Image (cartoon, helix red, strand yellow):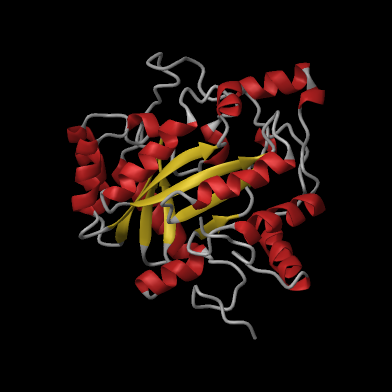
Amino acid sequence: MKSFPWGHQRRFNAYSNYFKKQFGQRIQKLSVNAGFTCPNRDGTVARGGCTYCNNEAFSPSYCVAGSSVTEQLQKGIDFHKDRYNASRFLAYFQNFSNTYASLDELKRIYDEALRFPEVEGLVIGTRPDVIDEEKLAYFAELSKRKYVIVEYGIESCYDQTLDRINRGHSFEQTKKAIEQTAAYGVKTGGHLMFGLPGETKQMMLDEVDILNNLPLNNIKFHQLQIMKDTIMAREYKENPDHFRFFELDEYIDFVIDVTERLNPAFVIERFSGEAPPRHTLSPRWGLRTPDVMNLIEQRMVDRDTWQGKYFKKS
């Protein structure tokens, strides 16, 4: 049996194994909606937000704006303890831009989450244009006693794509924010979306070499899904020929091609995304995320390949 540098037999540096190594047990993420907004919605950068954005599609039922952080976490803890026998958690601030507030407000919100003895740390989703050194210094200090990772929505490494989906920032800003966060000793994560309009498979594969040169700890991949009640949904209805969606079998081989080139030190959180059918307009694969993961892992065995097989350090 092959031996891999991440210390377990799965053919990629898996998130679940990473946390078992970090904490000695399974850790469950709990989504929290702390009522943040986004400079891409309130007029600071733009209005309307990213063209694909519908946060509701990815939020669990207990994660409701207007409920306090404490109420949401307590409901999430009770649910996962009862259903999955989970005992340790990370508070995942997922909705919109979770550093888009004053430092005092951030401290109040995050301190409220960390009052739970079961909460081992924070996962903070945000944009590269709402982070600064004062906030990073706070996260660096916090990370000395709790697990802290700042996750950036990269989505694409190409400015023409970022403009097309109305991200409101450049890739250079993303790169700078990730490098600055890592320089403070704070863990960094990134999201990348495959299948955005205007991008070819080769363009998407080329993004791997760009990502490999960033100081990322974790990475999430997800295929394009078009959510109802978004700007992109309107574009799709008006010009469906502008969009091309991965077939399941095609995506499995493509994401393995990506993984073969990926830095083996990066922890892969997920290979694909899933939203409830009531929220989606784009074609669905008819499988849950764990089922897609199983198919990917089996295909990796069939291809006798693994994360970083063709990784070249630059």
Q: Quadrant of the N terminus?
A: bottom right
Asked whether the viewer can see residue 25, the reply is no
Residue at x-position 47% and y-position 22%: 168
Q: Quadrant of residue 143?
A: bottom left
From the viewer's perspective, is 153 left or right of 295? Answer: left
Residue at x-position 49% and y-position 73%: 6
Residue 29 vertical position relative to residue 106 in the rendered view, above or below? below
Asked whether the viewer can see residue 313, the reply is yes
From the viewer's perspective, is 69 left or right of 244? Answer: left
* Residue 183 horizontal/vertical position (percent): 29, 49
Choose between 55 and 170: the one closer to the eye: 170
Choose between 60 and 172: the one closer to the eye: 172
Residue 132 vertical position relative to residue 263 in the rendered view, above or below? above
From the viewer's perspective, is 220 left or right of 200? Answer: left
Farthest-out residue, bottom: 1
* Residue 101 horizontal/vertical position (percent): 27, 29
* Residue 265 horizontal/vertical position (percent): 48, 63
Residue 3 vertical position relative to residue 289 in the rendered view, above or below? below
Farthest-out residue, front: 314
* Residue 47 horizontal/vertical position (percent): 47, 15
Residue at x-position 55% and y-position 41%: 58
Choose between 299 and 66: the one closer to the eye: 299
How many marks on residues?
Answer: 0
Residue at x-position 45% and y-position 15%: 46
